Amino acid sequence: MGDTISLGFLVKDGKDFLLLAYRNIAKIADEIVIVIENNDSGIDNALEIASYDDRVKVLLMNDCMNDKGANFLIKNCTKDWIIFLNGCDILSDTYYLIRDYIDNYNDFDAFSINKNVFIYNLGSLDATKEINEKCIFRNKNIYYENSNLTGFNKVWPIQDIQLFCFDGARNLRDFMQIYYKNLTNETRAYLEDWKNKIIMGNYALKPNNKDLPIILKEYFKLK
């Protein structure tokens, strides 16, 4: 048995995605900590998860989506490593490789995962932006300051795991249907048509060609 893993979720507006985020990655966790806003729409979902999974503890907090909330979550994680996610984060189907990285790259303090943030009001024409976010780290002397994790010595960038974030998404089922259609349709005429229909700004000339996790395809009923 290798090092143990705490899965931490920081949650606001968790009604739509918390259950999905939990189902997506719960298999590899030894402990699951959910810090959720008081009176949040996702509290019932969090309590439902805790009712059938004894690895789960649910902690309520006012205004948790900040450094204070992040550090409160970290403080309540007791295992060797922490996977730190928001309640709207879904990992690609290769999420299980996290276990391999933790077991085989033990000279590192943290792993960063490529993150695709889905922007709901862009409809679908390249409706993602990519950032790097350190979200897997050893549970020692690590804390948030000014929205950044501090205390790392060595960080390994993971290339074969992808994180899909649906922060702020609305009318998501409709937009995801369109986004997925665009993954396989890159003709100039089609994209020009979309560009003319979208209200905001300038966009890339073709969609992001990343596939979606199976769990999202099921949720959005995509083939």
Image (cartoon, rainbow, N blue to C red):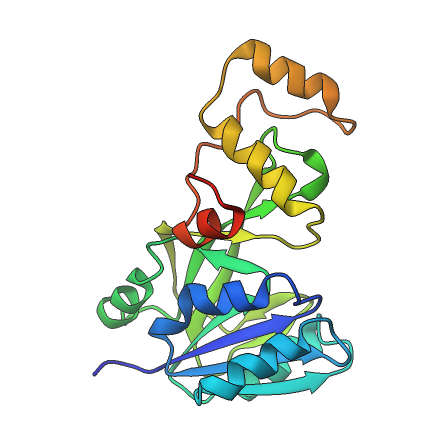
The quadrant of the rendering that contains the C terminus is: top left
- Across and down, in percent, residue 132 comes to 51, 51
Give the answer, above or below, for where 105 lies relative to 57.
Answer: above
Residue at x-position 34% and y-position 68% = 108
* Residue farthest toward the top in the current orientation of the protein: 189
- Report the side of 46 relative to 195 (left or right): left
- Report the side of 76 relative to 60 (left or right): left
Residue at x-position 22% and y-position 67% = 104
Residue at x-position 69% and y-position 35% = 122
The quadrant of the rendering that contains the N terminus is: bottom left
Q: How many labels does the image show?
A: 0
Give the answer, above or below, for where 26 lies relative to 201.
Answer: below
Residue at x-position 59% and y-position 86% = 58
Give the answer, above or below, for where 159 lies relative to 208.
Answer: below
- Across and down, in percent, residue 45 comes to 61, 75
* Residue farthest toward the front in the current orientation of the protein: 221
- Across and down, in percent, residue 167 comes to 66, 55
- Across and down, in percent, residue 43 comes to 67, 78
